[in-house]
Image (tube, rainbow, N blue to C red):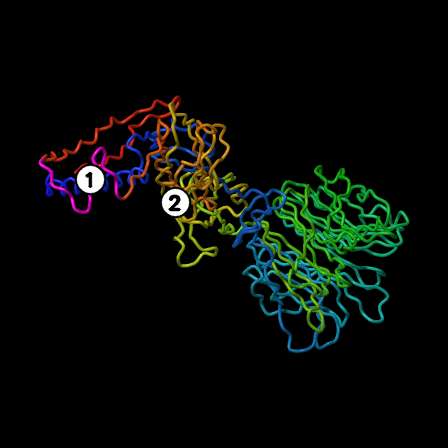
Amino acid sequence: MTKPDITRLTAAIFVFSAALAAVLVAASAAPSSGDSWWKDTFADATGLDILTNTVVANGSLMLAQETVTWTQTTAADFAAGTFSGTRVITAEDAIELAMAGFSAPTRVYSPTQPVAQKSPDLARDSAGGIHLVWQDVLASNKWEILYTRSSDGGITWAAPQELPHPSTAYRYPARIAAASPTELHAVWRESQEGETGDSIFYARSTNGGASWTLTTLASFGHAGNKTPAIARSASGGVHVVWARDYAGVFYANNANWGAVARISDVDAVQFSDAPHIVAGAANTVYAIWADTRAGTWNVYVDRSTDGGARWGMDVCINGVTGGQDAPSLAVASDGTVIAAWRGNRNQPTGGYDILVSRSTNGGSSWSAPTLILSPQTTTDQHNPVLAACGSFVHLLCRQNDGGKLNLFHAYSTDSGLTWSALAPADPGGAGIEHGPAAAVAEPSGRVYMAWEDRRESSGLIYTSCYDPNYVQQGVYLSPVWDTSGVTAWGTLAWDAVVPAGTSLSFQVRSGNTPAPDASWSNWSAPLVASGLPIPAPAGRFVQVRANLSTTDHSVSPRVHEMRLSYRRYKPAGAAVSVLIAPSPLGQWGQLTYTATVPAGSALHVDVCDASGAPLLTDVASGASLLGLSVQAYPALRLSARLESPGGSASPALDAWAVSWQADAPTPTATPSANPTATPSATPSATPTATSTEMPTPTPTPTPKLTPKITPIPHGRIFLPIVVRNAAR
């Protein structure tokens, strides 16, 4: 062998050794060309044995979505919202339009000198005008009777006028009736120094109060005349009653003022007081009063069906023990007669109550007395006053409130059958002394009130109006609802009653700040049918607006429930693969997967044993599984845990795969840096030339391995990924 041949042989040996070392290193760092793979790309769910709150959709494993419904259905739910022209009905768990309620109290006039005003009375004429009389101390320092009127529902009042009188007597509470804006009737009591009795005077005006004519119904010579009352019937009759101590109750009418008659059945009764008279249908007239014929105060009613020509027998209507006095009377449009009075049936352990009774047969019989309830059950109530028009009946009284007698109000919409609880009639006047009140109602259900008010140094006459009718329109704003995360809005549905003449619609807006601001969407177009899709952009926070309106002020739409639905991802879910059990199995390879994990979500992939118990948790893609013994774990499962705390986004697992080798690896010796040629001897430093020439080695090509496909029971089969080493 020549020296050049030895040199070429040595070089070839070194090249071969380096190539072999490189191949061995590459084989230890990359999957073997014989690796097999199980892989699932989630084309469907057949590669999964368990899905918990997860779904396979659009080629990915994701959290399932759920429909969430936010409901407002109780009074407490609604009360958390904002009301404008609306109110919550606690007993019905509903919202509706608000009642107009009480107007602000108005002082009738401001005199230029110190005065004292008290004992008002009201009447309403056929055109809706309101007429008012009261006692007033003028420059004479004697009680006088003043009159004024309002043509705008009590907003403004004409300058007061003094009613004429024939003497310098003191005049006491007047009562008024009005037929038209011009035809007025009034009655009062006068007391003159030096006289043994009091007079009852009647006055009539045919020019709207500009002038009056007087008629004496009872002269000063009759002792004990007091507390007159007046009523005008639709047929034109004017009826007056008054009480006289030790004589009973007396009556006169405009058919013949001189024909005064006693209408109480007992004439020797010691005391009679507070008579009241009302006109019913046709020629029916009712009178009510209290007297002591039975030893204690009781309430009696009498009636005439021929315009006052004849009267029936007195009927005691209080039906309970204890003193009963201060009665009032009203007639509803259906003919029901309603009576109210003060009773001390709970004395001496309790206070005075207001009781009511009603008759539906013209006064022949009366219902058992009903207590008008007050939230303050231990307080006293006094001086009830009734006013009726249509089926509305209003009751005013004074209630002891912290040592002050304040004005309270209750009403009935069914001719006195049922009643609201007593509530302050002057909501801003707590702690102010209120004197006895007067009231008059109109067909709409409104009631006008007047009373002596002592919020200033002396008593002055104030008026206000209570309107039980619904306002024309109102809005309810729900509280802002935090959905925590929304993928899509659902529908807005509601349960409501919408009577004819009313309307109801809803609007929705959304945003991503807890309080609505400029970043929120505008209110959606109105939804007028329940169950329609919500026309609002996706957002974490949402608010609903209900729009209520009516053209018939006696009715209102009423909302009992609102339901807003939306879709969001479930907060957590999981999925477990089918069993991966290759055979034959030499060693496990690696785990790989691809996924998209949006902000606000999380994905965890675990490697589990055949039972599903975790072996490796939170495994990263590309992680080696060589450490898993194939003897201990001949089969594996993959598990994915998906999380979306807010529900607005879900992780998406697009594919996962596990590799293995069918045969156990064979240990391979690592070649030395200077391999020894066999069978040739190692060349010396100075090689000896020979005559025999060595042939040039020819490289043997690496054989091409056929990819191996291993069937897996109950799994999904994919072509294996083969790593190839390119030969140069």
Q: Does the magenta segment cover residue 681?
A: yes
Residue 494 showing in the rendered view = yes
- Classify residue 266 as left or right of residue 410: right
Residue 13: give its label: 1
Residue type at the position of mark 2: Val
Reading the chain from its start, which is encountered first: label 2 or label 1? Answer: 1
The C terminus appears in which quarter of the rendering? Answer: top left
Residue 314 showing in the rendered view = no
Graded by Cα atoms within 10 Å as few (under 14), some (14 to 19) or many (20 or more), the crowding at tag 1 reads some
| Element type at mark 2 | loop
Residue at left offset 41%, top offset 39%: 532
Residue at left offset 48%, top offset 45%: 645
Report the span colored magenta.
Answer: 674-691
| Element type at mark 1 | helix
Question: Percent from the top left, x then y, of residue 242?
Answer: 78, 55
Rendering quarter of residue 161: bottom right
Rendering quarter of residue 659: top left
Q: Does the magenta segment cover residue 181?
A: no
Q: Residue under circle 2? A: 597
Considering depth in this image, is 352 or 299 the residue closer to the camera? 352
